[in-house]
Image: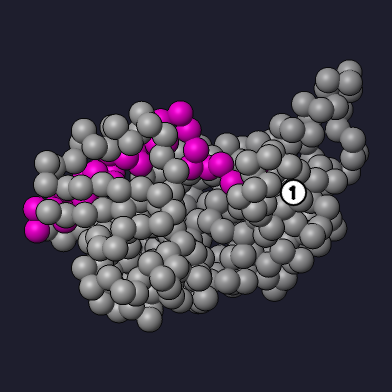
Amino acid sequence: MLKVHLNHETAPEHWADLQNRLDPGIRLSTGSRPPADFDILVTGEPTREDLTGNPRLRAVVVPWVGAPLATLDLMREFPHVALHNLPYNIGPTAEMAMALLLTAAKRVVASDQRFRRGYWSGEHPGVPGSVMLDGGLALILGYGRIGERIGLACRGLGMRVAGVRRNPILADEEYAIADLPALLPQASAFIVCLPHTHETEGLIGQRELDLLPPNAVLVNVARGAVVDETALYRALQARRIYAAGVDVWYRYPSAAERKLGLPHPPSVFPFHELDNVVMSPHRAGWSEEKEPARIAELSKMLNAANRGDSMPYRIDLDRGY
């Protein structure tokens, strides 16, 4: 019998859905304190106590795309336990990236706010009311499942696409990280969607932002720390780039603050005072269909393990994704 423990809250209807999708030979448990023995732990942030004293444990599944740095560092101490993630939200994340790109490029939020007060023109006479993406280059940093989906959408807008990944495959479309200095000055849209690892933390700093043309729009749906916080704020404040759409941030509320609905600034800098940034509270992967999609993907993984097959989406601890 395969024993699986989930240590995150799951609504009763989704719990029932998961049980209905699983093979009969799988036993589920849930709660912050796992049982003495189980085979698979579903959690984004396992503790050392979760990973020790249980010789049956063979895998940890992070129930979203990617894994926190603290989880990656801890799991390296337990190489006999496989680490997987759950890329169930590829479509919604790509949709949010495009929503942020278009909203920022067309200054939808700033125009909406002024128009509600009766103004038909922009607040800054020297600032274009929008930038055109058609014919421009969409530079996508992180050309995996999400990046490729974004690339399809950008082509639909008439854009050219350059995907940057660790191991490029197609020479006419895919590039290496080392090619960024040559690609950034050509970018109309710079979309960040690569995993957050020790290698990618702070990968985009002042040097890289200074290489972008003044009409460029930056979108980040990866993790905040991939783009240097200070450099991004200063580039937007000085209008060195046209605009940004940001869904991932630098300071997050605690679980207690979330539960109480308390306000929590996402940065030490007042991004909210800038009219050339569209701010989203890390909700790219959220939709009405989110949890059923997560349950469906998780059940496939657990059923595979129960049948003796390899579970997909294993993370390479050396690479971090």
81 on left or right of 113: left
Looking at this view, is 12 or 155 the one in front? 12
114 on left or right of 29: right
Which residue has dot 1 on it? 264
41 on left or right of 276: left
Looking at this view, is 299 or 137 the one in front? 299
Q: Position of residue 166 (x, y in %)?
A: 41, 71
What residue is drawn where x is 51% and y is 76%? Answer: 199
What residue is drawn where x is 41% and y is 43%? Answer: 89
- In the image, residue 302 lies in the stretch drawn in magenta: yes
Looking at this view, is 201 or 78 the one in front? 78
Tally the marks. 1
What residue is drawn where x is 31% and y is 74%? Answer: 53
| Residue density around tag 1, few if under 14, some if 14–19, many if 20 or more, within 10 Å | few
Residue extending farthest bottom: 77
Q: Is residue 199 above or below residue 262?
A: below
74 on left or right of 253: left
Amino acid type of disc 1? His
Magenta-colored span = 280-308
